[in-house]
Image (cartoon, rainbow, N blue to C red):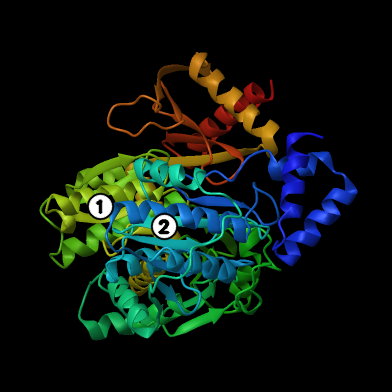
């Protein structure tokens, strides 16, 4: 009997094992599926700056009440070692068992004497980071797997600033997690207090979002323009439905057509098995409605409402804006509106990730904005906001964005916020509509002015233990023996972010080409995937896309070999 069968038997021997998990493991043992048993027990779910994320089910490498409780006990011990009295804000989205896991985390924290502020209904992830700040908590926990398929759930941890925990904090929490047994009994409750966050906290969050809206005229004229806008909205069966509609209603957007099949919270995501607004499949129901009704725009938010996707119909053609294109449009709009309203700070700052388009850098030059770049992940953008705040420059921050459809224009949280982005997008669409333009036409103007910057992402899935080893082999090959040329272009520089000054250590490789094109390779921090990001600039859209196609073709051949 191998080690993983022994682990399975240890679970079965636990007398209080939750009934659903028990029946799952009994069936698994009877079937004798060695590969499945190995995948469930060969490791524990990894805790890092992104917290936990994994497939739902029984096992150490699965999301269940025991792995959630163990992680929370580790967090509790960490907080008790740092603070005399700590508190934690907790939220959850519509995913399967999200409410159960939120309850499990609350019980564990309370048992260790830590006060808990728990949302009374599902709310977006950024609302948890906000609540941690609003209630002066020392941490926040969001139960979500973001845009992953329905078989996943996760556990995201924020610090007291509302930013995802840093590498140092994650390591210290992990140290406590590793010292905790999976089936350890919780201590008896110690008088810690559970408070349900209701309308006061929610309204404070909405007001914080509204504080970052743009201004281009008097309130009456802006409301008139927003009232003339018509949008289709899909929350993709997630947490964004009420918050997004509430904020849009408050700024004056009244004509909102909801995708009924994707309105109600449903962790099975029946009409979009991969509820990612980056993917056209997730937007199909919204596009159907967009074609039926006379509207200007489709917006969709992912289940935890921190990412947003946009689409429109132009001359009969469906146009899905990429995350980079939305970022370009938002940055240009914010700069113009801030200049018009005389609210541009003396030393404005844009923060973007290294895998995001470089086109905003040219827009920034025109408006005198400093561009700061970070590693992939909005937590690094959040850290930059925190640093500006500590240096007395919080108001200098005007936008942060990443190519994976995440945006934030305010400093009330340290995470991407699709409620904020939905508000800004609708303001932007209403502004251009009044002036005879669509978002597509405005984007074309920007491309003609600054050049056609195109970015493209390809992903390679590597499931299970063998897949993780394969990804490591590929990254080591790119690091130790990088290609001399790509698409008949010389590779002029290879940047290894394992040891790049000014950046935290990260398993990321960037290759720069003679023409200014580039590619970046990195394993995903949340999924078993290797991601390759291509970037090119051309005098025309076709030239930029041809450059990317040539790079992709050669990279695929290289990795297949």
Q: Position of residue 316 (x, y in %)?
A: 59, 65
Q: Is residue 483 above or below residue 129?
A: above
Is the C-beta separation of discs 1 and 2 under 8 Å? Answer: no
Is residue 375 found left or right of 105 in the rendered image? left
Residue found at x 46% / y 41%: 454
287 or 68, nearer to the observer: 68
Locate the N terminus and report the quarter of the image it occupies: top right
Identity of the residue furthest to the front in this view? 188
Q: Position of residue 346 (x, y in %)?
A: 10, 53
540 or 38, nearer to the observer: 38
Q: Position of residue 275 (x, y in %)?
A: 61, 61
Of marks 1 and 2, the one in the foreground: 2
Q: Is residue 490 above or below residue 265?
A: above
Q: How many marks?
A: 2
Residue found at x 48% / y 41%: 455
Say which quarter of the image contains residue 63: bottom right
21 or 265, nearer to the observer: 21
The dot on residue 76 is 2
- Identify the residue under disc 1: 385
């Amino acid at each position: 009997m191998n080690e993983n069968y022994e682990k399975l038997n240890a679970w079965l021997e636990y007398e209080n094992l939750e009934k659903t998990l028990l029946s799952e493991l009994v069936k698994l043992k009877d079937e004798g599926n060695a590969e499945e048993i190995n995948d469930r027990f060969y490791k524990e779910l990894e805790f890092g700056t992104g917290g936990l994320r994994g497939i739902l089910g029984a096992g150490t490498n699965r999301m269940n009440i025991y792995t959630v409780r163990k992680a929370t006990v580790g967090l509790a011990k960490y907080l008790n070692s740092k603070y005399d009295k700590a508190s934690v804000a907790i939220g959850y989205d519509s995913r399967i068992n999200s409410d159960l896991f939120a309850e499990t985390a609350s019980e564990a924290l309370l048992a260790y004497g830590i006060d808990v502020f728990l949302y009374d209904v599902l709310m977006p992830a950024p609302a948890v980071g906000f609540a941690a700040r609003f209630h002066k908590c020392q941490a926040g926990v969001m139960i979500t797997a973001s845009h992953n398929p329905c078989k996943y759930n996760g556990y995201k941890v924020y610090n007291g600033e509302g930013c995802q925990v840093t590498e140092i904090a994650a390591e210290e929490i992990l140290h406590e997690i590793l010292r905790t047994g999976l089936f350890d009994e919780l201590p008896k409750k110690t008088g810690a207090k559970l408070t349900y966050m209701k309308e006061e906290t929610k309204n404070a969050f909405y007001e914080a979002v509204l504080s970052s809206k743009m201004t281009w005229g008097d309130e009456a004229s802006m409301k008139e323009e927003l009232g003339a806008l018509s949008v289709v909205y899909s929350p993709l069966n997630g947490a964004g439905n009420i918050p997004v509609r509430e904020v849009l209603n408050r700024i004056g957007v009244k004509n909102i057509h909801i995708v009924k099949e994707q309105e109600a919270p449903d962790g099975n995501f029946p009409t979009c098995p991969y509820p990612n607004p980056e993917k056209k499949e997730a937007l199909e129901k919204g596009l159907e409605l967009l074609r039926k009704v006379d509207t200007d725009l489709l917006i969709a938010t992912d289940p935890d409402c921190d990412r947003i996707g946009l689409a429109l119909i132009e001359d009969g053609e469906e146009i899905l804006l990429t995350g980079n294109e939305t970022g370009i449009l938002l940055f240009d709009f914010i700069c113009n509106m801030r200049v018009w309203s005389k609210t541009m700070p003396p030393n404005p700052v844009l923060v973007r990730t290294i895998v995001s388009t470089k086109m905003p850098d040219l827009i920034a030059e025109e408006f005198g904005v400093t561009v700061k770049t970070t590693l992939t992940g909005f937590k690094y953008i959040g850290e930059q906001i925190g640093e500006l705040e500590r240096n007395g420059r919080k108001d200098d921050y005007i936008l942060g964005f990443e190519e994976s459809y995440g945006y934030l224009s305010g400093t009330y949280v340290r995470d991407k916020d699709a409620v904020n982005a939905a508000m800004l997008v609708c303001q932007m669409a209403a502004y251009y509509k009044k002036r005879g333009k669509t978002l597509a036409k405005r984007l074309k103007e920007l491309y003609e002015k600054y050049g056609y910057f195109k970015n493209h992402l390809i992903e390679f899935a590597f499931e299970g233990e063998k897949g993780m080893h394969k990804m490591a082999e590929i990254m080591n090959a790119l690091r130790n023996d990088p290609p001399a040329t790509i698409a008949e272009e010389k590779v002029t520089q290879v940047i290894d972010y394992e040891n790049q000054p000014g950046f935290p250590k990260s398993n990321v490789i960037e290759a720069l080409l003679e023409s200014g094109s580039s590619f970046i390779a990195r394993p995903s921090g949340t999924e078993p995937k290797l991601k390759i990001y291509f970037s090119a600039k051309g005098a025309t859209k076709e030239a930029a896309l041809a450059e990317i196609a040539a790079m992709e073709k050669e990279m695929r051949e290289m990795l297949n070999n």
